Amino acid sequence: MRPNNKKQTSRGFWGDLLERLPIVGAFLIMSLLAGTMFFNADGLPLYFHVRENRQQLIKQIEQLEYMNIAMQQDIVRIQSDPQRLEELARNRLGMVREGETVYQFVEPAPSSITALR
């Protein structure tokens, strides 16, 4: 081992502080910038909000994909099954076959006399 030939001189408290001042100042400035970056409205709160929104959108996409598959299956069934097509025509469009008689039952509206009883 070689002996350390450098002569270490103690500059005292103020000398050491002045020597380390640029490093301490840089650390303080970096800490301040990091703090404002993480804790202002556009930092961590925005990140967590976006992350939560992303999870909701993923769930919504999964639901829409499921609905899309169900609708595609229904389209195929309508195109290939005449009974399904007739069912839709009767229920949704109110269509009837030629020669059929339609009976419609209407409930009587409550009169003012029966409403008072």
Image: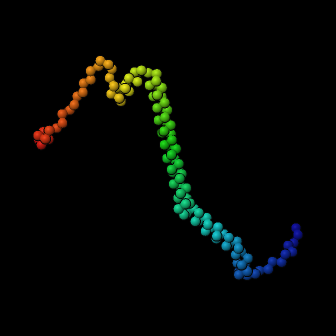
* Residue 14 in the figure: left or right of residue 63: right
Determine whether, in the image, residue 75 is placed left or right of residue 15: left
Q: What residue lies at 55% left-to-right and 59% top-to-bottom?
A: 44
In this orientation, which residue lies closer to the viewer: 45 or 113? 113
Q: Position of residue 88 (x, y in %)?
A: 38, 27
Q: Where is residue 14 in the image (x, y as percent from the top left)?
A: 71, 81
Judged from this view, the residue extending furthest toward the front is: 98
Q: Position of residue 79 (x, y in %)?
A: 46, 24
Whether residue 95 is situated above or below residue 60 in the rendered picture: above
Where on the picture, by quarter, is residue 19?
Answer: bottom right
The image shows residue 56, relative to residue 20, as above or below, that is above
The colour scheme applied to this rendered structure is rainbow
**Residue at 68% in and 70% down:** 26
Q: In which quarter of the image is the N terminus?
A: bottom right
On screen, residue 58 above or below 85: below
In the displayed structure, does residue 43 sit left or right of residue 11? left
Q: Where residue 34 sits in the image (x, y, percent)?
A: 61, 64
- Identify the residue shown where x is 22% and y is 28%: 105
Q: As drawn, which residue projects farthest toward the right?
A: 2
Task: From the viewer's side, name the closer residue of 1 and 79.
Answer: 79
Q: What residue do we see at 40% from left, 21% from top?
A: 83
